[in-house]
Amino acid sequence: IEKYLNMRYEGTDNAIMILECKDSDSPLSYARTFVDQYHREFGFELEGRDLLIDDFRVRAIVPGATPAPPPSVPSLGAPPAFGSCRAYFENGWETVSTYKFEDLKPGHEILGPAIIVQSISTIVLEIGCKAFVTTDGDLDITVQPKKHEDDVHMDTSNEDQKVEIKEDPVQLSIFAHRFMGIAEQMGRTLARTAISVNIKERLDFSCALFTNDGGLVANAPHIPVHLGAMQSAVRFQVEYWNSEGREGINEGDVFVSNHPQLAGGSHLPDITVITPVFHEGKILFFVASRGHHSDIGGISPGSMPPHSTNLEEEGARIVAFKLVKNGKFQEKGITDILVNQEYGGTRNLKDNLSDLRAQVAANNSGIRLLHQLVEENGLDTVEAYMHFIQHNAEMAVRHMLKDFAAQHGTKTHAIDYMDDGTPIELTINIDPDSGSACFDFEGTGPQILGNLNAPPAVTYSAVIYSLRSLVGQDIPLNEGCLAPIEFKIPHYSILNPSDDAGVVGGNVLTSQRVVDVVLKAFKACAASQGCMNNLTFGDSKFGYYETIAGGAGAGPTWNGRSGVHTHCTNTRITDPEILERRYPVLLRQFGLRKGSGGDGKHKGGDGVIREIEPLRPLVMSILSERRCLQPYGVEGGEPAKTGRNLLIKKNGISLNIGAKRSGAINVGERLVIESPGGGGYGAK
């Protein structure tokens, strides 16, 4: 009989199943086990918090009859091979024997390296392994443990033992996927432990690994606009906490920030949680997760106000704060920051705190997996391949730039405009010998009295995403992609605003225009919808946020996709069932907007129509672009249709509310969002 308590901290949502301790009759043993497991999962403790029991479970295990072990069979030695072939193993190319599985008899033994062929599969027997055919005709494979050399063990105390680690293309691919896999596992942990729809369902978050100086190594394929900015955020925290008079970075610390201009943020709702990875008192790496919180205060529910003109109106601002200090979650401190704001604090503190805990848990899972990777391969090897991967990405971008310069010349230029007429202008000068380039945004419009300003980190993200998309090989998106690039961004322009400028729209709208301009300069494809169609609604008790799909631009060999999130956004849309169950709205319509994509030899993708009706009075806000200027076509392709935002009154009258609007919507009224399509490519 096994007895379990399903336990959680009061005020949290994540319960953990705790097995009865056999060595103690005290009920406190459950509590001690829970605290240990919670710390292992989340990386911190909640002091002074009561423990709650959700339920009590009992599991009964009734043993069945134990089958008798099969009789042993004498060894018959190696069977005859039906052929041989060349195969690549860890020591290089080997000529190996091949065997047919149906020819094997009980007692046959095969030593690796060898290949055993079945009708539906192939078994590769590695060097040093042995396969034995049992009485039942099964293969019992003994795997020889891999031995590591002393020079790549985790012990870093003796520098003289280090040897040069040479880059191996096979190992490079393996480590690239291992690093990516760790970031993806962080994302799965975050989605599993978060509570908000925005993170749990829409997956509006990113997770990544960084070197000990904050350089991006690998990220999961989450939200492109987060990626370059996260690197800036990590490096800012390293510099901030190590500066004179600060506390420094200690084991048990976790940092949080969101300030776009000062701390490498993208916009205020995107909160970044950063955790150092220690070993023997030394920082080896950093892991970080950035999640979009559906409300952090500000002048409108959802914290995406269409008409904000300064940063304070957009919500809580965090430059640097220790979310976890000495292993203790600083709930009071972060609550004070989120609640005490000039224009009103968060409308859903519970979700904020739950999602922040989930982000810490996600980072903690990444730390465990990084330690496992170091245990398996040695610290020197892991660090070396982090730098090899960055160098590989750098060389891939340099080769791409050299190829472009050879075909199209060393200078290229593009310009596009926001709906208010603000230009985004880019001139790229490429050095054909080194493969480096200068991205000069001279001519870009000035900072605006609004919120379409984008901090430089957002421009870096847009460029790093575009370059990665243009590279014709599978490489992780990391710091190396930007190594060949020099940026020139005019001060106090829309792409480099002052510290107090409104930026909430720059992250989600201007970033899309920057991508369109970069891809236009490289003659890659037509414009996509150029917008994220940011919809928020709520009241004094809650805020909800979503981005709405549109059409993708066509290219030289493809039609644009319809009804997809494009470029800098990569989120899901909330499922209708979850949307209507969690929030007081009805989803009246959601489908493709036929004919909105640009015509051409290759057609642009169609946008979508999304129609929502409130079930009680709410404040709804829309923050969008491409309502005036069409997404362009290229090479003779037609532009796409612009988007449109309509308010349908009770009497049936439709009002065009423009690209950016916030206001009350009453029961019986409906908001209709028609998103733009993508441009066409080539004349028909």
Image (cartoon, rainbow, N blue to C red):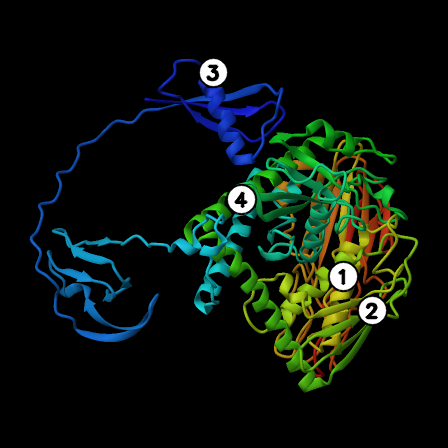
Q: Which residue ends up furthest to the top in the rendered image?
A: 26
From this view, report whether residue 608 is shown above or below residue 650. below
The three-letter code of the residue at mark 4 reads: Ile
Give the mark nearest the N terminus, 1 or 4: 4
Can residue 345 be seen?
Answer: yes
The three-letter code of the residue at mark 1 reads: Thr
**Crowding at mark 4 (Cα within 10 Å: few <14, some 14-19, many 20+):** many
- Contact (Cβ within 8 Å) of mark 1 with mark 3: no
Q: Based on the displayed image, in which of its 4 quarters is residue 243 positioned?
A: top right
Which percent across, then down, holds residue 592?
A: 67, 60
Q: CA distance from mark 2 to mark 3?
A: 63 Å
Q: Which quarter of the image is occupied by the N terminus?
A: top left
- Contact (Cβ within 8 Å) of mark 2 with mark 4: no
Q: CA distance from mark 4 to mark 3?
A: 29 Å
Where does label 4 land, which residue? 367
Residue that appears at 87% across and 42% down: 313
**Crowding at mark 2 (Cα within 10 Å: few <14, some 14-19, many 20+):** many
- Contact (Cβ within 8 Å) of mark 4 with mark 3: no
Q: CA distance from mark 2 to mark 4?
A: 38 Å
SS class of the residue under badge 2? Answer: loop
- Contact (Cβ within 8 Å) of mark 1 with mark 4: no
SS class of the residue under badge 3? Answer: helix
Residue that appears at 55% across and 20% down: 52
Where does label 2 land, which residue? 441
**Crowding at mark 1 (Cα within 10 Å: few <14, some 14-19, many 20+):** many
Which percent across, then down, holds residue 245?
A: 77, 38
Which percent across, then down, holds residue 340?
A: 82, 31
Give the mark nearest the N terminus, 1 or 3: 3
Give the mark nearest the N terminus, 2 or 3: 3
Where does label 3 land, which residue? 28
- Contact (Cβ within 8 Å) of mark 2 with mark 1: yes
